[in-house]
C-alpha cells in the first residue's frame, strides 16, 4: 500500500521481526519484489540489522539502504589486509617525504 501511495521510504525492522519469530529477511525480500513490480520509487530502509552477512544477502536481493549499529559497521569495515596496506602506504609516504 505504501509503495503504491508514493511514499519515499518504508522501514521494516528486520531484527525485531525476527525476534517475533517472523522471517524478517524473507519479508524484506518480498517488499522489494513488490516495490520493483509496481515500478515504484519507494526505497526500503531495512533497519535493526545485526550482522554484516545479512546486509550482503539483502544487497544481493536489490536492497541497498540500511541502518545498523557500530558493531556491525566495524564488522563491515574492519579488514586486516586493508588496514595493513594502508599502514604500509603511510609509512612509505612518510619515508618519501623525509628523504
Image (cartoon, rainbow, N blue to C red):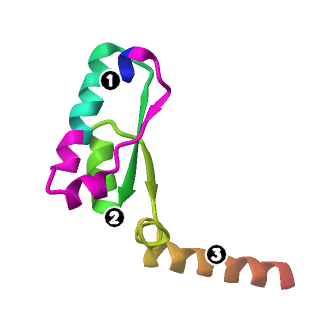
Disc 3 element: helix
- Whether 7 is among the magenta residues is yes
Q: List x then y, in percent, for residue 21.
A: 14, 56
- Whether 24 is among the magenta residues is yes
Disc 2 element: loop
Which residue, given by chain and number where applicable, does mark 2 sit on? Answer: 50
Residue, x 24% and y 27% (percent of image)? 33
Pick the quarter of the image with the C terminus. bottom right
The answer to whether the residues at label 2 and label 3 have Cβ atoms under 8 Å apart is: no
Q: Which label's residue is closer to the chain start, 1 or 2?
A: 1
Span shown in magenta: 5-27
**Quarter of the rendering containing residue 15:** bottom left
Q: Is residue 10 visible?
A: yes
Which residue, given by chain and number where applicable, does mark 1 sit on? Answer: 35
Disc 1 element: helix
7 above or below 71? above
Q: Residues within 10 Å of mark 1 (few under 14, many from 20)?
A: some
Q: Nearer the viewer, residue 38 or 97?
A: 38
Amino acid at each position: 500500500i505504501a509503495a503504491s501511495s508514493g511514499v519515499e521510504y518504508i522501514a521494516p525492522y528486520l531484527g525485531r521481526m525476527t525476534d517475533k519469530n517472523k522471517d524478517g529477511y524473507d519479508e524484506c525480500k518480498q517488499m522489494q519484489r513488490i516495490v520493483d513490480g509496481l515500478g515504484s520509487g519507494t526505497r526500503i530502509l531495512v533497519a535493526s540489522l545485526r550482522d554484516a552477512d545479512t546486509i550482503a544477502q539483502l544487497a544481493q536481493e536489490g536492497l541497498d539502504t540500511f541502518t545498523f549499529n557500530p558493531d556491525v559497521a566495524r564488522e563491515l569495515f574492519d579488514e586486516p589486509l586493508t588496514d595493513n596496506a594502508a599502514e604500509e602506504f603511510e609509512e612509505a609516504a612518510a619515508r618519501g617525504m623525509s628523504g
